[in-house]
Amino acid sequence: MILMKKAIFVGRFQPLHNGHVNAIKRIVEQDDIYHLHIIIGSANKKYTDDNPLSFETRKYIISETLNDLIRAGKITISGLDDHANDEDWIKNLKQIVPDADITYSGNEWTRRCIEPFCKVEEPDFLDKDILNGTNIRLRIKEKKEIKHLVPEKVFEHFKK
């Protein structure tokens, strides 16, 4: 018998890119994962170089991109604000998802904070050297092509 797990995927999604989408789909497809709760970190940060998108925009883009999985009840999305200390951040995360069995995050700080409370793994990202938020934000700033790196909703947003 397979023990079913509830998973968390923590990221800023600034912006959502094809590496995120691939990793999320691979998590949901695992036989032992019954639900994935996507946590949009830095929900209280927006309109800066590192955080160009608001929480609402990021949630909309993720919802539209993963609509089939959301409608099937496989994914839930919530926001998590940054906090002055790690303890408050963890406390708020545990309030949002108190029953998580495993957490996925590509961020070393996030993994370190969560490890005492929950099993943590790095997501299976595609081509991390190219498919990462820093690279994509730089490409956007330099007005370089991003269409091949991001879902359609992200491309449409930045095309404006």
Image (cartoon, grey):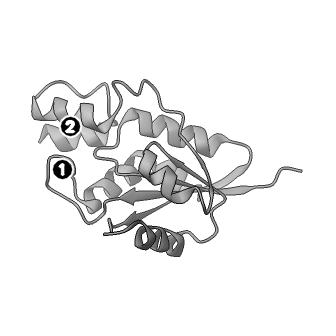
Query: Where is 19 relative to 70, above or below?
Result: above
Q: Is residue 67 above or below residue 158?
A: below
Q: Secondary structure at mark 2?
A: helix
Please give the label number shown on residue 106: none
Nearest to the observer: residue 150 or residue 113: 113
User: Label 1: few (<14), some or many (≥20) within 10 Å?
Assistant: some
Q: Quadrant for residue 85, please give it.
A: bottom left
In contact (CB < 8 Å): disc 1 and disc 2: yes
Dot label at residue 52: 1
Q: Is residue 108 left or right of residue 118?
A: left
Between 113 and 52, the residue placed more toward the observer is: 113
Q: SS of the residue at dot 1?
A: loop
Where residue 137 is drawn, which disc sits there? 2
The image quarter in which residue 57 lies: bottom left
Estimate the x, y position of residue 14 in percent, counting from the top left: 28, 46
Residue 98 in view, yes or no = yes
Left or right of 61, for residue 143: left
What's the CA distance linking mark 1 and mark 2?
A: 8 Å
Percent x, y of residue 29: 64, 41
**Residue, x 40% and y 45% (percent of image)?**
65
User: Residue 160, percent across and down?
Assistant: 11, 42
| Kind of residue sitting beneath label 1 | Pro
Task: Tell me which numbered mark, 1 or 2, is placed earlier along the sequence.
Answer: 1
